[in-house]
Image (cartoon, rainbow, N blue to C red):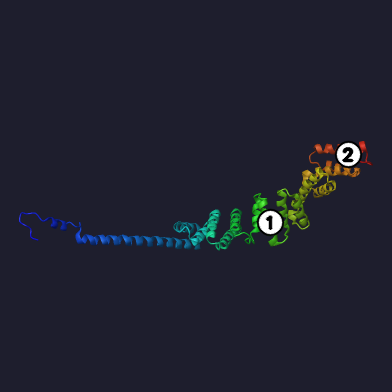
């Protein structure tokens, strides 16, 4: 088109020149920009995947080197990106357990087991391994108990070989005798009727107020108990016999009461109960009409009473009552 001198360009020409701010080159640049954005998105996805893979590898390396805290940090990073991955759950739970965070390990293992029941055996074995290490290396009864309880929750009836005795002792030391009992029973099942174990079992029953069962176990070991624990047997037998004897007195089961109280005086323990036991024996003998035996029992109660006291006077009064008021030949 030829431009007229001094004239205006036709409207069509102006429109043709303004169809794009970049013209043909602008369309090329726009296509290039779109390609760059797509490539960046793809690279970003690859970087994220690579990051997860790297964190998992770093976690495995740290775990293999015994740096469980670092391994846990890496595994948790991967788990946040893959919250439903059972394999990552197991790795993370394993690291939780090794760092002593048993409750968190149990919760994560439980979630993994819900997704894959076959994980239960692995989880229980892992927790029991932690429990054994806690009892053998650190003597950490609290961690061992928590790990065993978690393992039993995930896999009931799991084998506790080697753990029953230390767990029973742990619970006993902490006054948790009810929790100690089943572990003592398991330990006896593993180790056989060891006198020390049976004595510990008797103690647990006594502490729980079950003197009848405690005496049953004490009778089993009274002749075999180690010398160092002989005094303990005497005390526990005397104590439980006195408690049960007094119950029998209240129920007027006099023959049974007499037999039990005689065990207390034979053991000579507990020392602060011996005089009372003799006094009660005297009362039983008097009720049976065995007046001379009753007098002898009351006299023994006076001798055994520690530091004087009301019991001495009561025993003296009963002796006088038998001798001077009712006689020794008839009913006392």
Q: Is residue 87 left or right of residue 299?
A: left
Callout 1 environment at 10 Å: few (<14), some (14 to 19), or many (20+)? many
Q: Is residue 118 left or right of residue 320?
A: left
Q: Is residue 79 left or right of residue 132?
A: left
Q: Which residue is mark 2?
A: 319
Give x and y (percent) for residue 114. 54, 59
Query: Is residue 178 among what the camera can see?
Result: yes
Q: 269 or 156, which is in the foreground?
A: 156
Q: Which residue is mark 1?
A: 184
Query: Is residue 97 among what the camera can see?
Result: no
Q: Quadrant of the C terminus?
A: top right
Q: 309 or 55, which is in the foreground?
A: 55
Give x and y (percent) for residue 173. 65, 51
Give x and y (percent) for residue 273. 78, 44
**The residue tagged with tag 1: helix, strand or loop?**
helix
Question: N-terminal of the two: label 1 or label 2?
Answer: 1
Q: Is residue 1 left or right of residue 138?
A: left
Whether residue 243 is situated above or below residue 116 in the rendered picture: above
The disc at residue 239 is none
Q: Quadrant of residue 292?
A: top right
């Amino acid at each position: 088109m030829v431009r007229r001198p001094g004239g205006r360009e036709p409207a069509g020409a102006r429109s043709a020149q303004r169809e794009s701010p970049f013209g043909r080159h602008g369309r090329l640049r726009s296509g290039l920009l779109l390609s760059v954005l797509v490539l960046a998105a793809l690279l970003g996805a690859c970087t994220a995947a690579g990051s997860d893979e790297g964190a998992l590898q770093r976690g495995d390396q740290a775990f293999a080197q015994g740096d469980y805290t670092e391994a846990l940090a890496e595994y948790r990073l991967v788990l946040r990106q893959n919250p439903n991955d059972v394999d990552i759950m197991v790795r993370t739970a394993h690291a939780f357990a090794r760092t002593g965070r048993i409750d968190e390990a149990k919760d994560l293992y439980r979630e993994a087991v819900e997704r894959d029941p076959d994980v239960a055996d692995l989880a229980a074995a892992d927790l029991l391994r932690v429990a054994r290490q806690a009892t053998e290396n650190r003597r950490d009864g609290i961690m061992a108990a928590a790990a065993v309880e978690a393992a039993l929750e995930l896999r009931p009836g799991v084998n506790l070989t080697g753990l029953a005795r230390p767990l029973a002792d742990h619970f006993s030391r902490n006054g948790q005798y009810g929790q100690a009992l089943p572990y003592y029973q398991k330990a006896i099942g593993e180790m056989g009727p060891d006198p020390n174990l049976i004595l510990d079992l008797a103690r647990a029953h006594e502490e729980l107020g079950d003197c009848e069962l405690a005496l049953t176990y004490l009778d089993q070991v009274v002749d075999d108990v180690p010398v160092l624990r002989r005094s303990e047997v005497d005390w526990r037998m005397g104590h439980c016999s006195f408690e049960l004897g007094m119950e029998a007195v209240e129920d007027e089961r006099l023959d049974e009461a007499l037999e039990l109280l005689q065990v207390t005086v034979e053991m000579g323990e507990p020392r602060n109960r011996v005089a009372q036991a003799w006094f009660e024996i005297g009362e039983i003998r008097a009720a049976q009409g065995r007046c001379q035996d009753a007098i002898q029992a009351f006299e023994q109660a006076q001798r055994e009473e520690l530091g004087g006291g009301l019991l001495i006077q009561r025993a003296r009064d009963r002796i006088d009552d038998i001798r001077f008021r009712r006689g020794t030949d008839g009913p006392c």
